[in-house]
Image (cartoon, helix red, strand yellow):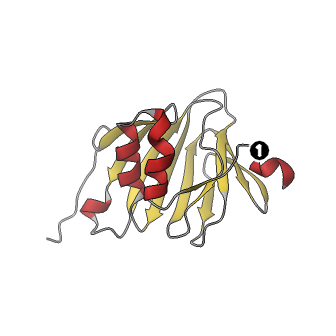
Amino acid sequence: MNTIQLIKKNEGISLHIANGQYRTIISGNQTEGKYAIIEMNVPPGGGPGPHAHKDIEEVFYVSDGKVDFYTENGLHKAKAGDTIRIPLGGAVHAFKNVSDNDAMLICTVYPAGLDEMFAEINALDPSKVKVSGEKFGQQFFPDDYFDKKL
């Protein structure tokens, strides 16, 4: 069915991920797996450690706050209004909220899949997160991975 849809700010699926509040605005189930859109409210100092996913492209729009994105080709300091693109291919990346308040990112993933992973991780004991992530094609790297590269 080809119907225009309004998703209000309190709609979607709320999740607690990495000490932050994530909300799946549009899931892969709604797009036949083509993409998903996830709102990420990240607390000060929060964000995921170094990781990669070769089969998923991510586009992060920073709608509020300041976020440092760590990549193999350097540090990118993003602020409200900036966009970061992590292309297909498995580029290792991480990000950290360097604001005094929560940062908000709108993340679009192509194809969908991370939305399903986040939903599964939300219900898991933290000791099982890595296994779940790997099931969805996520690779994890040591926390100091970028220390040698930057």
**Nearer the observer, 52 or 129:** 129
What's under tag 1, amino acid-wise? Asp
Q: How many marks?
A: 1
Name the foreground residue: 32 vs 39.
32
Residue at image coords 43%, 59%? 136
106 left or right of 140?
left
Q: What residue appears at the point 42 percent right and 50 percent down from the top-left corner? A: 38
Residue 105 horizontal/vertical position (percent): 53, 46
Q: Residue 14 is drawn in which quadrant?
A: top left
Image quadrant for the N terminus? bottom left
On screen, 81 above or below 54? above
Depth check: 142 or 46 in front?
Answer: 142
Q: Residue at x 17, y 71 (%)?
A: 2
Q: Does the image show residue 114?
A: yes
Q: Is residue 139 above or below residue 147?
A: below
Residue 150 is at least partly visible in this image: no
Q: Nearer the viewer, residue 150 or 68?
A: 150
Q: Quadrant of residue 22?
A: top left
Residue 104 in the figure: left or right of residue 23: right
**Residue that carries the numbered disc 1 in the rendered image:** 144
Residue 25 x %, y %: 34, 50
Answer few, some or many: residues within 10 Å of disc 1's Cα (few below 14, many 20 plus, some between 14 and 19): few
Image location (x, y in percent) of residue 35:
38, 65
Q: Position of residue 140 (x, y in %)?
A: 60, 52
Q: Element under label 1?
A: loop
Please determine whether, in this image, residue 123 is positioned above or below residue 62: above
Q: Residue at x 22, y 63 (%)?
A: 4
The image quadrant that residue 114 belongs to is: bottom left
